[in-house]
Image: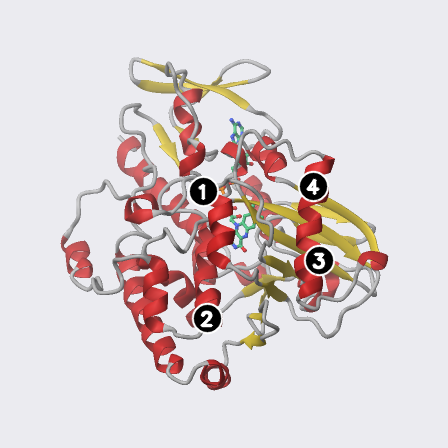
Amino acid sequence: MNTWESGGYRFDTGPSLITMPWVFEALFEAAGTRMSDHLTFQSVHPFAEYHFDDGTHFTHTGDLPAWLTTVRALEQNDASGFLRFMELGARLFNVSQATFFSRSPFERPNCQIIRALRHLPLRFGWGNYDRTVRHFFRSPHLRQLFNRYITYVGSSPYQAPATLSVIPYVEYAFGVRHIQGGLYRMIEVLCALGEKEGVEYRMNTPIRSIMRRGGRVIGVEPEKGPLIEADVVIMNGDASCAPVLLGESGAQPLPERNRSMSGLIFLYALKRTLPDLSHHQIFFSADYPTEFRQLFDERRFPDDPTVYINIPSRTDRSLVPGEGEVLFVMANAPANDGDTWDDAMIKQARTHVMQRLRKSGFPDIEQDISASTVWTPRKMAMQYGMPGGAIYGQASHSWRGAFMRPPNKDRSVAGLYYVGGSTHPGGGTPTVVMSADITSRLVEQYESS
Ligand SMILES: Cc1cc2nc3c(=O)[nH]c(=O)nc-3n(C[C@H](O)[C@H](O)[C@H](O)COP(=O)(O)OP(=O)(O)OC[C@H]3O[C@@H](n4cnc5c(N)ncnc54)[C@H](O)[C@@H]3O)c2cc1C
Protein backbone atom coordinates (compact mmCIF):
# COMPACT_ATOMS: atom_id res chain seq x y z
CA MET A 1 0.00 0.00 0.00
CA ASN A 2 1.35 3.34 -0.94
CA THR A 3 0.14 6.73 -2.04
CA TRP A 4 0.91 9.45 -4.60
CA GLU A 5 -0.48 12.96 -4.67
CA SER A 6 -0.34 15.66 -7.33
CA GLY A 7 -2.19 18.96 -7.52
CA GLY A 8 -4.86 17.86 -5.04
CA TYR A 9 -5.44 14.49 -6.76
CA ARG A 10 -4.79 11.64 -4.30
CA PHE A 11 -3.98 8.12 -5.53
CA ASP A 12 -3.44 4.69 -4.06
CA THR A 13 -0.54 3.08 -5.90
CA GLY A 14 -1.28 -0.45 -4.65
CA PRO A 15 -4.52 -2.07 -3.50
CA SER A 16 -7.75 -0.74 -4.95
CA LEU A 17 -10.33 -2.86 -3.18
CA ILE A 18 -10.74 -4.34 0.26
CA THR A 19 -12.54 -7.56 1.09
CA MET A 20 -13.24 -9.28 4.43
CA PRO A 21 -13.54 -6.04 6.45
CA TRP A 22 -13.98 -7.96 9.72
CA VAL A 23 -10.30 -8.90 9.62
CA PHE A 24 -9.39 -5.20 9.92
CA GLU A 25 -12.06 -4.60 12.55
CA ALA A 26 -10.44 -7.33 14.69
CA LEU A 27 -7.05 -5.65 14.25
CA PHE A 28 -8.40 -2.35 15.56
CA GLU A 29 -10.10 -4.15 18.44
CA ALA A 30 -6.75 -5.72 19.32
CA ALA A 31 -5.37 -2.17 19.51
CA GLY A 32 -8.19 -1.28 21.92
CA THR A 33 -10.24 0.85 19.55
CA ARG A 34 -12.97 0.65 16.92
CA MET A 35 -12.21 0.86 13.23
CA SER A 36 -15.33 2.93 12.57
CA ASP A 37 -13.93 5.67 14.87
CA HIS A 38 -11.02 6.11 12.46
CA LEU A 39 -12.02 4.98 8.97
CA THR A 40 -15.10 5.02 6.77
CA PHE A 41 -15.49 1.88 4.66
CA GLN A 42 -17.69 2.48 1.61
CA SER A 43 -19.38 -0.40 -0.20
CA VAL A 44 -18.69 -0.28 -3.92
CA HIS A 45 -21.73 -0.81 -6.20
CA PRO A 46 -21.64 -2.33 -8.72
CA PHE A 47 -18.55 -4.53 -8.28
CA ALA A 48 -17.29 -3.86 -11.81
CA GLU A 49 -18.11 -3.21 -15.45
CA TYR A 50 -16.72 -5.89 -17.77
CA HIS A 51 -15.86 -5.19 -21.42
CA PHE A 52 -15.02 -8.01 -23.85
CA ASP A 53 -13.20 -8.06 -27.15
CA ASP A 54 -16.35 -9.02 -29.10
CA GLY A 55 -18.15 -5.89 -27.85
CA THR A 56 -20.07 -7.66 -25.07
CA HIS A 57 -20.39 -5.45 -22.02
CA PHE A 58 -22.16 -6.04 -18.71
CA THR A 59 -22.25 -5.02 -15.08
CA HIS A 60 -21.18 -7.36 -12.29
CA THR A 61 -23.41 -6.56 -9.38
CA GLY A 62 -23.87 -7.90 -5.86
CA ASP A 63 -27.64 -7.61 -6.35
CA LEU A 64 -28.34 -11.33 -6.84
CA PRO A 65 -31.59 -11.18 -8.87
CA ALA A 66 -30.08 -8.57 -11.24
CA TRP A 67 -26.87 -10.58 -11.55
CA LEU A 68 -28.70 -13.84 -12.28
CA THR A 69 -30.67 -12.03 -15.02
CA THR A 70 -27.35 -10.94 -16.56
CA VAL A 71 -25.94 -14.46 -16.29
CA ARG A 72 -29.06 -16.03 -17.88
CA ALA A 73 -28.86 -13.57 -20.76
CA LEU A 74 -25.31 -14.76 -21.42
CA GLU A 75 -26.08 -18.47 -21.01
CA GLN A 76 -29.31 -19.84 -19.52
CA ASN A 77 -27.74 -22.78 -17.63
CA ASP A 78 -24.96 -20.71 -16.09
CA ALA A 79 -27.30 -19.26 -13.45
CA SER A 80 -27.40 -22.62 -11.67
CA GLY A 81 -23.68 -23.01 -12.47
CA PHE A 82 -23.01 -19.71 -10.70
CA LEU A 83 -24.95 -20.76 -7.60
CA ARG A 84 -23.17 -24.12 -7.46
CA PHE A 85 -19.80 -22.39 -7.95
CA MET A 86 -20.60 -20.07 -5.04
CA GLU A 87 -21.61 -23.07 -2.93
CA LEU A 88 -18.22 -24.64 -3.64
CA GLY A 89 -16.56 -21.34 -2.67
CA ALA A 90 -18.61 -21.18 0.54
CA ARG A 91 -17.55 -24.68 1.56
CA LEU A 92 -13.91 -23.88 0.84
CA PHE A 93 -14.22 -20.61 2.78
CA ASN A 94 -15.67 -22.35 5.84
CA VAL A 95 -12.85 -24.90 5.83
CA SER A 96 -10.24 -22.15 5.29
CA GLN A 97 -11.54 -20.07 8.22
CA ALA A 98 -10.88 -22.92 10.64
CA THR A 99 -7.57 -24.02 9.11
CA PHE A 100 -5.54 -22.19 6.49
CA PHE A 101 -6.55 -18.62 7.45
CA SER A 102 -5.99 -19.00 11.16
CA ARG A 103 -3.05 -21.35 11.64
CA SER A 104 0.48 -21.93 10.50
CA PRO A 105 0.64 -24.98 8.19
CA PHE A 106 3.30 -26.51 10.43
CA GLU A 107 1.27 -26.44 13.61
CA ARG A 108 0.09 -29.85 14.77
CA PRO A 109 -3.60 -30.30 13.76
CA ASN A 110 -6.09 -30.41 16.63
CA CYS A 111 -9.59 -31.99 16.70
CA GLN A 112 -11.21 -28.78 15.42
CA ILE A 113 -8.93 -28.79 12.36
CA ILE A 114 -9.53 -32.43 11.61
CA ARG A 115 -13.30 -31.90 11.91
CA ALA A 116 -13.09 -28.91 9.51
CA LEU A 117 -10.98 -30.81 6.98
CA ARG A 118 -13.64 -33.51 6.78
CA HIS A 119 -15.79 -30.90 4.99
CA LEU A 120 -13.22 -30.18 2.28
CA PRO A 121 -15.08 -30.52 -1.04
CA LEU A 122 -12.81 -32.91 -2.91
CA ARG A 123 -14.73 -32.93 -6.17
CA PHE A 124 -13.99 -29.75 -8.21
CA GLY A 125 -12.35 -28.19 -5.15
CA TRP A 126 -9.12 -30.03 -5.73
CA GLY A 127 -8.20 -29.99 -9.44
CA ASN A 128 -7.25 -27.19 -11.80
CA TYR A 129 -9.00 -23.82 -11.38
CA ASP A 130 -9.76 -23.17 -15.07
CA ARG A 131 -11.18 -26.70 -15.46
CA THR A 132 -13.45 -26.12 -12.47
CA VAL A 133 -14.63 -22.78 -13.92
CA ARG A 134 -15.33 -24.52 -17.25
CA HIS A 135 -17.32 -27.15 -15.43
CA PHE A 136 -19.66 -24.56 -13.87
CA PHE A 137 -19.90 -22.05 -16.76
CA ARG A 138 -20.47 -22.45 -20.47
CA SER A 139 -20.41 -18.75 -21.37
CA PRO A 140 -16.91 -17.77 -22.59
CA HIS A 141 -17.47 -14.34 -21.02
CA LEU A 142 -18.22 -15.77 -17.59
CA ARG A 143 -15.29 -18.16 -17.89
CA GLN A 144 -12.98 -15.22 -18.55
CA LEU A 145 -14.55 -13.17 -15.74
CA PHE A 146 -14.14 -15.92 -13.12
CA ASN A 147 -10.69 -16.89 -14.34
CA ARG A 148 -9.52 -13.33 -13.68
CA TYR A 149 -9.91 -13.76 -9.90
CA ILE A 150 -6.69 -15.75 -9.82
CA THR A 151 -4.82 -12.58 -10.73
CA TYR A 152 -5.81 -11.34 -7.23
CA VAL A 153 -2.94 -13.58 -6.09
CA GLY A 154 -0.74 -12.75 -9.09
CA SER A 155 -1.18 -16.15 -10.70
CA SER A 156 -2.53 -17.88 -13.80
CA PRO A 157 -5.99 -19.51 -13.75
CA TYR A 158 -4.58 -22.18 -16.06
CA GLN A 159 -2.04 -23.28 -13.44
CA ALA A 160 -3.77 -22.52 -10.13
CA PRO A 161 -5.64 -25.05 -7.99
CA ALA A 162 -9.45 -24.99 -7.89
CA THR A 163 -9.29 -24.42 -4.15
CA LEU A 164 -8.82 -20.73 -5.00
CA SER A 165 -12.53 -20.67 -5.94
CA VAL A 166 -12.76 -19.23 -2.45
CA ILE A 167 -11.64 -15.83 -3.90
CA PRO A 168 -14.70 -15.08 -6.11
CA TYR A 169 -16.93 -16.41 -3.32
CA VAL A 170 -15.46 -14.01 -0.75
CA GLU A 171 -15.94 -11.05 -3.09
CA TYR A 172 -19.51 -11.98 -3.98
CA ALA A 173 -20.67 -12.96 -0.51
CA PHE A 174 -19.08 -10.17 1.50
CA GLY A 175 -18.72 -7.37 -1.06
CA VAL A 176 -16.05 -4.91 -2.08
CA ARG A 177 -15.04 -1.85 -0.02
CA HIS A 178 -13.28 1.43 -0.60
CA ILE A 179 -11.88 3.51 2.26
CA GLN A 180 -12.91 7.14 2.19
CA GLY A 181 -9.88 9.32 1.51
CA GLY A 182 -8.10 6.38 -0.17
CA LEU A 183 -6.98 2.96 1.04
CA TYR A 184 -3.70 4.44 2.26
CA ARG A 185 -5.71 6.04 5.11
CA MET A 186 -5.53 2.56 6.70
CA ILE A 187 -1.73 2.82 6.88
CA GLU A 188 -1.81 6.37 8.24
CA VAL A 189 -4.27 5.41 10.96
CA LEU A 190 -2.47 2.18 11.92
CA CYS A 191 0.89 3.98 12.10
CA ALA A 192 -0.61 6.62 14.40
CA LEU A 193 -2.16 3.92 16.60
CA GLY A 194 1.15 2.06 16.76
CA GLU A 195 2.94 5.24 17.79
CA LYS A 196 0.42 5.76 20.56
CA GLU A 197 1.16 2.23 21.78
CA GLY A 198 4.90 3.00 21.88
CA VAL A 199 6.01 1.65 18.50
CA GLU A 200 9.12 3.39 17.20
CA TYR A 201 9.42 3.51 13.40
CA ARG A 202 12.71 3.87 11.56
CA MET A 203 11.73 4.82 8.04
CA ASN A 204 14.04 4.38 5.03
CA THR A 205 16.34 2.03 6.92
CA PRO A 206 17.17 -0.89 4.60
CA ILE A 207 18.32 -3.95 6.52
CA ARG A 208 21.41 -5.62 5.10
CA SER A 209 21.74 -8.58 7.46
CA ILE A 210 19.86 -10.55 10.06
CA MET A 211 22.47 -11.32 12.70
CA ARG A 212 22.52 -14.55 14.73
CA ARG A 213 24.70 -16.20 17.34
CA GLY A 214 24.52 -19.84 18.34
CA GLY A 215 21.39 -20.54 16.28
CA ARG A 216 19.45 -17.55 17.64
CA VAL A 217 18.85 -14.06 16.24
CA ILE A 218 20.59 -11.21 18.02
CA GLY A 219 19.37 -8.33 15.84
CA VAL A 220 19.50 -6.71 12.43
CA GLU A 221 22.15 -4.70 10.70
CA PRO A 222 21.07 -1.68 8.65
CA GLU A 223 22.94 -0.66 5.51
CA LYS A 224 24.03 2.42 7.45
CA GLY A 225 24.53 2.53 11.17
CA PRO A 226 25.18 0.07 13.97
CA LEU A 227 23.54 -3.27 14.79
CA ILE A 228 19.99 -2.95 16.12
CA GLU A 229 19.83 -5.56 18.87
CA ALA A 230 16.69 -7.66 19.20
CA ASP A 231 15.47 -10.83 20.95
CA VAL A 232 12.97 -11.46 18.18
CA VAL A 233 13.13 -10.46 14.51
CA ILE A 234 9.99 -10.50 12.36
CA MET A 235 10.74 -10.11 8.68
CA ASN A 236 8.03 -8.43 6.57
CA GLY A 237 10.01 -8.30 3.31
CA ASP A 238 9.82 -11.16 0.79
CA ALA A 239 10.57 -14.28 2.83
CA SER A 240 12.64 -15.79 0.03
CA CYS A 241 15.25 -13.06 0.70
CA ALA A 242 15.80 -14.27 4.29
CA PRO A 243 18.64 -16.74 3.47
CA VAL A 244 20.42 -13.87 1.68
CA LEU A 245 20.02 -11.60 4.73
CA LEU A 246 21.21 -14.47 6.95
CA GLY A 247 24.35 -14.67 4.80
CA GLU A 248 23.84 -18.31 3.80
CA SER A 249 26.30 -19.32 1.10
CA GLY A 250 24.85 -19.46 -2.44
CA ALA A 251 21.48 -18.07 -1.23
CA GLN A 252 19.29 -16.59 -3.97
CA PRO A 253 15.85 -14.96 -3.74
CA LEU A 254 12.83 -16.64 -5.36
CA PRO A 255 13.71 -17.89 -8.88
CA GLU A 256 11.83 -16.19 -11.76
CA ARG A 257 9.90 -19.32 -12.77
CA ASN A 258 8.28 -19.54 -9.30
CA ARG A 259 7.29 -15.87 -9.00
CA SER A 260 3.81 -14.39 -8.98
CA MET A 261 3.12 -11.56 -11.41
CA SER A 262 4.04 -7.94 -11.12
CA GLY A 263 2.13 -5.06 -12.67
CA LEU A 264 2.54 -2.02 -14.84
CA ILE A 265 0.54 0.87 -13.42
CA PHE A 266 -0.21 4.28 -14.87
CA LEU A 267 -1.71 6.90 -12.57
CA TYR A 268 -3.55 9.72 -14.32
CA ALA A 269 -4.98 12.88 -12.79
CA LEU A 270 -7.82 13.81 -15.15
CA LYS A 271 -9.28 17.30 -15.52
CA ARG A 272 -12.47 15.84 -16.98
CA THR A 273 -15.15 14.11 -14.90
CA LEU A 274 -16.34 10.76 -16.31
CA PRO A 275 -19.83 10.38 -14.79
CA ASP A 276 -20.79 7.41 -16.99
CA LEU A 277 -18.00 5.18 -15.71
CA SER A 278 -18.11 3.16 -12.51
CA HIS A 279 -15.45 2.59 -9.87
CA HIS A 280 -13.97 -0.64 -11.34
CA GLN A 281 -13.66 -1.37 -15.08
CA ILE A 282 -12.10 -4.42 -16.72
CA PHE A 283 -11.19 -4.48 -20.42
CA PHE A 284 -10.45 -8.07 -21.35
CA SER A 285 -7.90 -9.20 -23.91
CA ALA A 286 -9.17 -11.20 -26.90
CA ASP A 287 -7.29 -14.36 -25.95
CA TYR A 288 -6.80 -15.05 -22.24
CA PRO A 289 -4.72 -18.28 -22.54
CA THR A 290 -2.27 -16.46 -24.87
CA GLU A 291 -2.03 -13.53 -22.45
CA PHE A 292 -1.02 -15.87 -19.58
CA ARG A 293 1.33 -17.84 -21.82
CA GLN A 294 3.14 -14.62 -22.66
CA LEU A 295 3.23 -13.59 -19.00
CA PHE A 296 4.41 -16.87 -17.48
CA ASP A 297 6.02 -18.97 -20.24
CA GLU A 298 7.46 -16.33 -22.56
CA ARG A 299 7.89 -13.95 -19.61
CA ARG A 300 7.04 -10.80 -21.53
CA PHE A 301 4.48 -8.03 -21.38
CA PRO A 302 1.43 -9.24 -23.35
CA ASP A 303 0.75 -7.99 -26.89
CA ASP A 304 -2.91 -7.64 -25.92
CA PRO A 305 -3.09 -7.07 -22.13
CA THR A 306 -6.26 -7.19 -20.05
CA VAL A 307 -6.52 -3.70 -18.58
CA TYR A 308 -7.99 -2.90 -15.19
CA ILE A 309 -9.06 0.69 -14.51
CA ASN A 310 -9.88 1.79 -11.01
CA ILE A 311 -11.58 5.19 -10.68
CA PRO A 312 -12.08 5.59 -6.91
CA SER A 313 -13.18 9.21 -7.41
CA ARG A 314 -16.44 7.78 -8.81
CA THR A 315 -17.25 6.72 -5.21
CA ASP A 316 -15.18 9.21 -3.24
CA ARG A 317 -15.02 12.83 -4.43
CA SER A 318 -12.55 13.73 -1.63
CA LEU A 319 -9.79 12.30 -3.86
CA VAL A 320 -10.03 15.10 -6.43
CA PRO A 321 -9.78 18.88 -6.04
CA GLY A 322 -13.20 19.54 -7.66
CA GLU A 323 -13.94 18.41 -11.18
CA GLY A 324 -11.98 15.47 -12.59
CA GLU A 325 -11.03 11.91 -11.73
CA VAL A 326 -8.12 9.85 -10.44
CA LEU A 327 -7.41 6.90 -12.74
CA PHE A 328 -5.35 3.83 -11.78
CA VAL A 329 -4.69 1.86 -14.97
CA MET A 330 -3.05 -1.53 -14.47
CA ALA A 331 -1.98 -4.45 -16.64
CA ASN A 332 -0.26 -7.60 -15.43
CA ALA A 333 3.45 -7.90 -16.17
CA PRO A 334 6.06 -10.61 -15.56
CA ALA A 335 8.36 -10.26 -12.55
CA ASN A 336 11.70 -10.49 -14.39
CA ASP A 337 15.09 -9.37 -13.08
CA GLY A 338 16.41 -8.41 -16.51
CA ASP A 339 13.60 -6.10 -17.68
CA THR A 340 14.95 -2.57 -17.79
CA TRP A 341 11.58 -0.79 -17.93
CA ASP A 342 13.30 2.16 -19.55
CA ASP A 343 11.34 4.85 -21.43
CA ALA A 344 11.23 2.80 -24.66
CA MET A 345 9.88 -0.28 -22.88
CA ILE A 346 7.26 1.73 -20.99
CA LYS A 347 6.20 3.48 -24.21
CA GLN A 348 5.76 0.18 -26.04
CA ALA A 349 3.74 -1.35 -23.20
CA ARG A 350 1.61 1.79 -22.96
CA THR A 351 0.82 1.52 -26.66
CA HIS A 352 -0.54 -2.02 -26.06
CA VAL A 353 -2.59 -0.80 -23.09
CA MET A 354 -4.05 2.13 -25.04
CA GLN A 355 -4.81 -0.12 -28.05
CA ARG A 356 -6.85 -2.42 -25.83
CA LEU A 357 -8.72 0.54 -24.29
CA ARG A 358 -9.46 2.10 -27.68
CA LYS A 359 -10.66 -1.23 -29.05
CA SER A 360 -12.99 -1.64 -26.05
CA GLY A 361 -14.50 1.83 -26.45
CA PHE A 362 -12.85 3.57 -23.48
CA PRO A 363 -13.09 7.37 -23.96
CA ASP A 364 -10.03 9.18 -25.27
CA ILE A 365 -8.43 10.83 -22.22
CA GLU A 366 -5.04 11.94 -23.58
CA GLN A 367 -5.98 15.66 -23.69
CA ASP A 368 -7.45 15.60 -20.17
CA ILE A 369 -4.42 14.29 -18.25
CA SER A 370 -3.05 17.02 -15.95
CA ALA A 371 -0.48 14.86 -14.11
CA SER A 372 0.72 11.29 -14.35
CA THR A 373 3.25 8.82 -13.07
CA VAL A 374 4.12 5.20 -13.73
CA TRP A 375 4.95 2.26 -11.48
CA THR A 376 6.89 -0.50 -13.24
CA PRO A 377 7.84 -3.97 -11.94
CA ARG A 378 11.39 -2.68 -11.62
CA LYS A 379 10.31 0.24 -9.45
CA MET A 380 8.34 -2.13 -7.20
CA ALA A 381 11.31 -4.48 -6.98
CA MET A 382 13.61 -1.66 -5.91
CA GLN A 383 11.21 0.12 -3.58
CA TYR A 384 9.81 -2.94 -1.76
CA GLY A 385 12.58 -5.54 -2.09
CA MET A 386 10.23 -7.85 -4.03
CA PRO A 387 12.19 -10.16 -6.39
CA GLY A 388 11.47 -8.80 -9.90
CA GLY A 389 8.51 -6.86 -8.45
CA ALA A 390 6.53 -10.10 -7.78
CA ILE A 391 3.63 -8.68 -5.79
CA TYR A 392 2.55 -11.91 -4.09
CA GLY A 393 5.85 -13.75 -3.56
CA GLN A 394 5.66 -17.24 -5.04
CA ALA A 395 2.97 -17.94 -7.63
CA SER A 396 -0.07 -19.89 -6.41
CA HIS A 397 0.48 -22.52 -9.06
CA SER A 398 -0.36 -26.07 -8.03
CA TRP A 399 -1.71 -26.91 -4.63
CA ARG A 400 1.76 -26.76 -3.16
CA GLY A 401 2.48 -23.26 -4.51
CA ALA A 402 -0.82 -21.93 -3.18
CA PHE A 403 -0.91 -23.56 0.22
CA MET A 404 2.62 -24.50 1.21
CA ARG A 405 3.94 -20.95 1.42
CA PRO A 406 6.97 -19.97 3.51
CA PRO A 407 6.03 -20.59 7.15
CA ASN A 408 5.67 -17.82 9.73
CA LYS A 409 8.47 -19.18 11.93
CA ASP A 410 11.96 -20.00 10.74
CA ARG A 411 12.68 -23.71 10.92
CA SER A 412 16.27 -23.42 12.09
CA VAL A 413 16.95 -19.93 13.49
CA ALA A 414 15.34 -19.34 16.88
CA GLY A 415 13.65 -15.96 17.34
CA LEU A 416 13.18 -15.38 13.58
CA TYR A 417 9.64 -15.04 12.24
CA TYR A 418 8.01 -14.03 8.95
CA VAL A 419 4.88 -12.07 8.14
CA GLY A 420 3.17 -10.61 5.08
CA GLY A 421 2.12 -11.39 1.56
CA SER A 422 4.99 -13.69 0.62
CA THR A 423 4.39 -15.99 3.62
CA HIS A 424 1.49 -18.06 4.89
CA PRO A 425 -1.44 -17.59 4.26
CA GLY A 426 -0.60 -15.31 1.28
CA GLY A 427 -0.97 -11.89 -0.32
CA GLY A 428 -3.83 -9.42 -0.33
CA THR A 429 -4.47 -6.94 2.49
CA PRO A 430 -6.81 -9.04 4.68
CA THR A 431 -4.65 -12.15 4.27
CA VAL A 432 -1.59 -10.15 5.32
CA VAL A 433 -3.40 -9.12 8.51
CA MET A 434 -4.30 -12.80 9.11
CA SER A 435 -0.62 -13.57 8.64
CA ALA A 436 0.21 -10.98 11.32
CA ASP A 437 -2.25 -12.62 13.68
CA ILE A 438 -0.73 -16.09 13.13
CA THR A 439 2.82 -14.73 13.55
CA SER A 440 1.91 -12.81 16.72
CA ARG A 441 0.48 -15.96 18.27
CA LEU A 442 3.60 -17.95 17.32
CA VAL A 443 5.79 -15.29 18.96
CA GLU A 444 3.67 -15.46 22.11
CA GLN A 445 3.84 -19.25 22.09
CA TYR A 446 7.60 -19.59 21.56
CA GLU A 447 9.04 -16.44 23.12
CA SER A 448 7.00 -15.81 26.26
CA SER A 449 9.05 -18.01 28.63
C1 LIG B 1 -0.45 -2.79 -7.61
C2 LIG B 1 -0.99 -3.61 -6.49
C3 LIG B 1 -2.36 -3.86 -6.41
C4 LIG B 1 -2.88 -4.60 -5.37
N1 LIG B 1 -4.24 -4.75 -5.26
C5 LIG B 1 -4.76 -5.30 -4.13
C6 LIG B 1 -6.16 -5.20 -3.87
O1 LIG B 1 -6.92 -4.63 -4.65
N2 LIG B 1 -6.63 -5.73 -2.71
C7 LIG B 1 -5.80 -6.32 -1.80
O2 LIG B 1 -6.28 -6.74 -0.73
N3 LIG B 1 -4.46 -6.42 -2.01
C8 LIG B 1 -3.93 -5.91 -3.15
N4 LIG B 1 -2.57 -5.92 -3.35
C9 LIG B 1 -1.72 -6.73 -2.46
C10 LIG B 1 -1.43 -6.08 -1.13
O3 LIG B 1 -1.16 -4.73 -1.30
C11 LIG B 1 -0.23 -6.78 -0.53
O4 LIG B 1 -0.42 -8.18 -0.48
C12 LIG B 1 0.06 -6.28 0.89
O5 LIG B 1 0.00 -4.88 1.00
C13 LIG B 1 1.43 -6.76 1.28
O6 LIG B 1 1.71 -6.34 2.58
P1 LIG B 1 3.06 -6.78 3.27
O7 LIG B 1 3.06 -6.20 4.62
O8 LIG B 1 3.25 -8.24 3.12
O9 LIG B 1 4.20 -6.16 2.36
P2 LIG B 1 4.62 -4.67 2.13
O10 LIG B 1 3.51 -3.73 2.41
O11 LIG B 1 5.30 -4.65 0.81
O12 LIG B 1 5.67 -4.43 3.30
C14 LIG B 1 6.96 -4.94 3.27
C15 LIG B 1 7.88 -3.81 3.64
O13 LIG B 1 9.15 -4.36 3.91
C16 LIG B 1 10.11 -3.49 3.36
N5 LIG B 1 11.36 -4.24 3.17
C17 LIG B 1 11.60 -5.30 2.36
N6 LIG B 1 12.87 -5.70 2.48
C18 LIG B 1 13.46 -4.88 3.39
C19 LIG B 1 14.78 -4.79 3.97
N7 LIG B 1 15.77 -5.62 3.62
N8 LIG B 1 15.01 -3.80 4.85
C20 LIG B 1 14.04 -2.95 5.24
N9 LIG B 1 12.78 -2.99 4.76
C21 LIG B 1 12.50 -3.95 3.84
C22 LIG B 1 9.49 -3.02 2.05
O14 LIG B 1 10.10 -1.85 1.59
C23 LIG B 1 8.06 -2.80 2.51
O15 LIG B 1 7.86 -1.51 3.01
C24 LIG B 1 -2.01 -5.17 -4.38
C25 LIG B 1 -0.65 -4.90 -4.45
C26 LIG B 1 -0.13 -4.12 -5.48
C27 LIG B 1 1.34 -3.83 -5.49
Any mark on residue 346, and which? 4
Per the model, the C-alpha gap separating discs 2 and 1 is 23 Å
| Residue 217, x across and y down, in percent | 36, 20
- Looking at the picture, which amino acid does disc 1 mark? Asp
Q: Mark 4 or mark 2, which is nearer to you?
A: 2
Q: Mark 1 or mark 4, which is nearer to you?
A: 1
Task: Report the number of discs.
Answer: 4
Per the model, the C-alpha gap separating discs 4 and 3 is 18 Å
Residue at image mark 2? 140
**Tag 3 or tag 4, which sits nearer the N-term?**
3
Q: In the figure, is residue 366 to the left or right of 172?
A: right
Any mark on residue 327, and which? 3
Is residue 429 at all visible to an observer of this figure? no
Q: Is residue 172 above or below residue 311?
A: below
**Which residue is at 56% across, 24% downward?**
206
Q: Is residue 64 above or below residue 349?
A: below
| Residue 23, x across and y down, in percent | 43, 57
**Tag 4 or tag 1, which sits nearer the N-term?**
1
Q: Is residue 157 above or below residue 424?
A: below
The answer to the question of whether label 2 and label 1 lie on touching residues, with beta carbons closer than 8 A, is no
Per the model, the C-alpha gap separating discs 2 and 3 is 28 Å
Q: Secondary structure at mark 3?
A: strand
